[in-house]
Amino acid sequence: MNETTQFVAHDYQEYAINKITATPKCGLFLDMGMGKTVTTLTAISELMYNLLEVSKVLVIAPLRVAEDTWSRETEKWSHTSFLQVSKILGPAECRKEALNQRADIYVINRENLAWLVDHLGKNWDFDMVVVDEFSSFKNSKSQRFKALRKVMPKIKRLVGLTGTPAPNTLLDLWPQIYLLDRGERLGKTKRAYLDKYFTPGARNGHVIFEWRLKNGAEDHIHRHVSDICVSMKAEDWLEMPERIDNTISIKLPSKARAQYSELEKEFLLEFEHSDVVADSAAVLSNKLLQLANGAIYDENQEYQEIHSKKLEALAD
């Protein structure tokens, strides 16, 4: 049995956990490295085994995340290692078999969500859904969006996980919030959302290619969704020590130094079966950097090893 790690929540994680347990439909917009997965798993454990409000959880994630991240994170932490995870992945028969397994959390890649909705039909029994990378549901015309919208009335709890939205991504925010509140906060349609918060820019006839945020719209949007969304940036919450720069000086071997000087002077360095040619000052600068690092690309796009001093210093 693998060793587990004791989880001690940071203040912001504790806040996010409480937000998930207290808010049936919510968005968790946290920067990378802030622990979205363990935070959500902690809330799932609380909702399922302490509050008894959830019985079966579906996690929708990118394929690689579905294959590894959720099961690995569940097994890693001592307070979640008892949770059983079943992966609805691979060919249809494997997916059906995984569905029939007894588990707490079922993980599926987002490309198979439409299949799952059609397969279960009226027998949909996931009362909690977690969407990892919620921003992948930004297209309201996509099959995955339509599939999730179809079963929304049967889902008691929905958690959307993604990074913090930047101003240029607010254009795509409406579909995600719609899945949480069915249009209560940002409007029933995307066009209504665009008309309220954005100004049309470049267009071709009736087709608008660019939308610009109106003055004050960003703050207004954030206020409107603040009761169901948690948005935190790593720089505001993670206490990191000051960066320490440790500069290690490397002395080039005499042969490499001579090759460096030749290339710098002649814009040409000859090898047995190929040459290195720098036809401009910019290319020369790049080639000299390559040589100093230990290897250089020749005219055949193959690399020529010059020295290994930097690798030796790294090993030390």
Image (spheres, grey):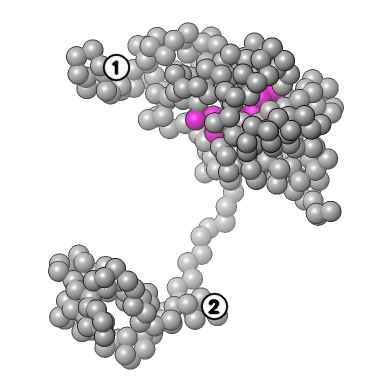
Q: Can you identify the residue that label 2 sits on?
A: 315
Q: Residue at x 66, y 15 (%)?
A: 121
Q: Residue at x 79, y 51 (%)?
A: 4
Left/right placement of residue 298 relative to residue 47 reads: left
Which of 102/192 is in front? 102
Circle 1 packing at 10 Å, graded few (<14), some (14-19), many (20+), is few
Q: Can you identify the residue that label 1 sits on?
A: 199
- Amino acid carrying mark 1 in the image: Thr
Left/right placement of residue 312 relative to residue 228 reads: left
Query: Vertical placement of 48 versus 258: above or below?
Result: above
Q: Position of residue 242 (x, y in %)?
A: 53, 58
Mark 1 vs mark 2, CA separation in Å: 56 Å
Q: Position of residue 218 (x, y in %)?
A: 41, 23
Q: Position of residue 166 (x, y in %)?
A: 43, 32
What is the secondary structure assignment of the residue under circle 1? strand
Q: Are marks 1 and 2 in contact (CB under 8 Å)?
A: no
Question: Is residue 75 one of those drawn in magenta?
Answer: no
Q: Residue at x 15, y 67 (%)?
A: 280
Magenta region: which residues?
Answer: 128-136
Query: Vertical placement of 176 versus 107: above or below?
Result: above
Q: Position of residue 14 (x, y in %)?
A: 70, 34
Label tally: 2
Left/right placement of residue 73 relative to residue 287 reads: right
